[in-house]
Amino acid sequence: MSAELSLFLQKAQHVLERLEPLLPKKHGTPDWSQVLAARWQPDAQGGYLAPLSVNLALELEDLLGIERQRSILTANTQQFIQGFPANHALLWGARGTGKSSLVRALLARFAVQGLRLIEIERDALTDLPRLVASLGQDNARWRFIVFCDDLSFEAGEGDYRVLKSVLDGSLEQAPDNLLLYATSNRRHLVPEKSSDNDHWQMVEGELHPNEAVEDKIALSDRFGLWLSFYSFSQDQYLDAVRHWVNQLAKASSLNWIWNDSDEKEALRWALGRGNRSGRCAYQFARHWVGVKLSEQKGV
């Protein structure tokens, strides 16, 4: 090899080393036998599925106060796992009441039966056709729930109409091994104003909504199953507090006794946040157990 050629190859190698970090990375399809969950990541090449590490410690039985919703969604998911007809689901209602936790607890319950979870952001839902295509025929043995957390639109946003068309086409053409579960604080995903009712019409004795209302409702109608979540009653909240205190105390080998002053403290905690929910109960339990452990160790 001549000196000139050797020098040229060295320079070419240096150029390639400098260019390589700037080139788009190649992303393979997750190995679903090892990966339980993934997140859809949009990029210049169209997007890819990035594997996620998931914690399966949360069980369905940990979700108190939402027994009815838990039972219905579990049954729907069980039908889906078995290859029977099942519905796309919209979980809507008060914050912190266990909507997202319920979906993740379903993964813990059914992962061994082939359920896999794919998270997708609201703004990436227009990539849903690409996501469905990326799964391909090789993954027919797995059952996929595409999960969109906090799906909602603010006043003045018009892209919900685009999303409506995307969801409509994507969900109609989705393979039998794919369902869409979404959570929202709004029943119809978009703000609803009293002015929407100004142009309702009476037709042959029946009250008919105007076209604007119909247009807004049409988006949530893409989901065959609607489950509503409400703020907890005082008893439901305290039951959830005691459950999580028990779980966390066991994990940290804390001997604990629950008394009236602890109950009052738990209620003040919820009052200070203006919300009684499972999330609030879990946060108070972490606070309470942490304080007791500190006192036990004399910190």
Image (cartoon, rainbow, N blue to C red):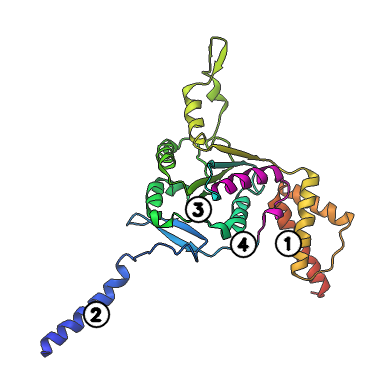
Report whether 145 appears left or right of 173: right
Mark 4 lies on residue: 56
Q: Which residue is mark 2?
A: 14
Upstream in sequence: badge 4 or badge 2:
2
Residue at the location (71% across, 52% down)?
280
Range of magenta residues = 58-80
Q: Which residue is mark 1?
A: 286
Cα separation between marks 3 and 1: 34 Å
| Mark found first going from the N terminus, 1 or 4 | 4
Q: CA distance from mark 2 to mark 3?
A: 46 Å
Q: Secondary structure at mark 4?
A: loop
Q: CA distance from mark 1 to mark 4?
A: 19 Å
Among the two numbered marks 4 and 3 on one chain, the one whose residue lies closer to the N terminus: 4
Q: Which residue is mark 3?
A: 143
Is residue 295 positioned above or below 244 on the image? below
Q: CA distance from mark 4 to mark 2?
A: 46 Å
Q: Which callout, 3 or 1, points to the residue nearer the camera?
A: 3
| 9 up-or-down from 260: above or below | below
Q: Nearer the viewer, mark 4 or mark 3?
A: 3
